[in-house]
Image: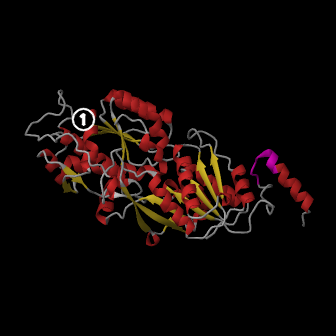
Amino acid sequence: MLISRATRAATLAACAMSLLATSACGTDRSDEATATPIRLYGTDSTMLSSFPSELGTRAGLVDGMKGTTPLTPLPEDFKNRLRSIDSGLTDFVYAAEAYDAVLISALAAQLAGTTDPAAIAKQIVGVTNDGERCETAATCLELASDGQDIEYRSVSITRAGFTTAGEPSTASYATLHFDGEQINDSKTEFVGAGSESTASTEAPPPPKRQGAGASNRNDGSPLVLGGLLPKTGDLALSNPPLAAGAALAIEEINAAGGVLGDPVTWIDGDDGTNPAVAKATVASHVAAGVDVIIGAGASGVSRAVLPDVVEAGLVLFSPSNTDASLTDLDDEGHYFRTAPPDSLQGRALADVILRDGPQQVAIVARQDSYGEGLQNIVRSELERAGIGSDRLKLITYQPPEDAEAAPVDFTAGVHEITSFGADAVLIIGFSESAGLIRALADAGVPLHR
């Protein structure tokens, strides 16, 4: 049966008033949908082989989606070692960064000759700069035990060391492509970013040579690391590689004799992708005598717990925080990260989008420091490349507070995208942003394959 234009308009108006994406609203969407197929782009947590599972039976909607994530070409040997920890591992994003965060922490303690967090913090940047180069836990720990300054290079730190702010001076990004419901590894490209000239040249305190039976603290306690990783919440998809990387490092450190003559202790902990959950975990770690906290997963969560970490005098070392504004955070020397800041990723991501010659670009981001920060960086890079501000649409959404919260309603966002006439949509979010892809499909928007 044909539907009149007036009837169609009335139906759409009723849908807008109710803000419900019902099947009745979806039966005729020609006023909402654009005839031009939209290309989907993603970052970090949406560019995982596990991400399509968030779409359930509609996992194929990601077919053709592409994006970037911090990732180096990982040797097969390293992947196999990770699989020995977790045989079901399908993604490796941030696994190398987690491994390196744990190992750098251990090396810093060995060089400091103590597990005192303040002394460890003073050694972390120096571990990666201007010393005798080493690449394995056993070799690096042996050099550090002999009191030699070291320059650690490994899976995520390959070209240059840390800046004085305690983060990578250079980085590698991977351009990833979904073919069907999986990342097609044969299409993955790698691009470098950053400058070796920004690596720190400041000398750390002299390393302490450790003799047999040397103690660490006055009480002789071993180095204790506490996990603050996203076992639950919207970033839980990223946890398997993070957890595997950290566990592998602990295993190899202890196989090499541990730190200061003692095995390193790991106390697991969840950040919940939620500040409240993370704060409770930090409090538990403080009570348990943790020296270095590995995490949090999300930049906003690290920002929220850092005051608690600083007050307790501990070290917070994240393998996956990318919010560029964290570089200038007043952390009193307690915060470090192996993940590169988004100031480096923005250009690589903009380049991926520009290759397809988009006319109208919508950038949809979480309303938090990570989402809005990367959104603005990509916007700046696109404008620098000649995409006028009139061809860019910035959209943000409030992420769910916890796993029990109602799913994000992307109805209004889809209307903004289609009204704008976007032919490219960049999604900056975690698992919840799968809802945007569903909403676009429900609105009849053709997705480019």
Q: Nearer the viewer, residue 131 or 227?
A: 131
From the top left corner, tell me how far across and down residue 20 is, in percent.
76, 48
Query: Which image quadrant for residue 81?
Result: bottom left
Query: Which image quadrant for residue 194?
Result: bottom left
Quadrant where the image shows the N terminus: bottom right
Residue underneath mark 1: 119
From the top left corner, tell me how far across and down residue 376 is, in percent.
56, 51
Residue 18 included in the magenta stretch of the image: yes
Residue stretch rendered in magenta on the structure: 15-22
Q: How is the image coloured?
A: secondary structure
The answer to whether residue 127 is seen in the rendering is yes
**Vertical order, 221 against 249 (above or below):** above
Quadrant where the image shows the C terminus: bottom right
Label 1 element class: helix
Q: How many marks?
A: 1
The answer to whether residue 49 is seen in the rendering is no
From the top left corner, tell me how far across and down residue 299 is, in percent.
47, 43
Q: Give the residue displayed 16% in from the left and 39% down from the top.
A: 260
- Kind of residue at badge 1: Ala
From the top left corner, tell me how far across and down residue 351 is, in percent.
52, 65
Q: Nearer the viewer, residue 236 or 411?
A: 411
Query: Which image quadrant for residue 117?
Result: top left
**Vertical order, 77 against 218 (above or below):** below
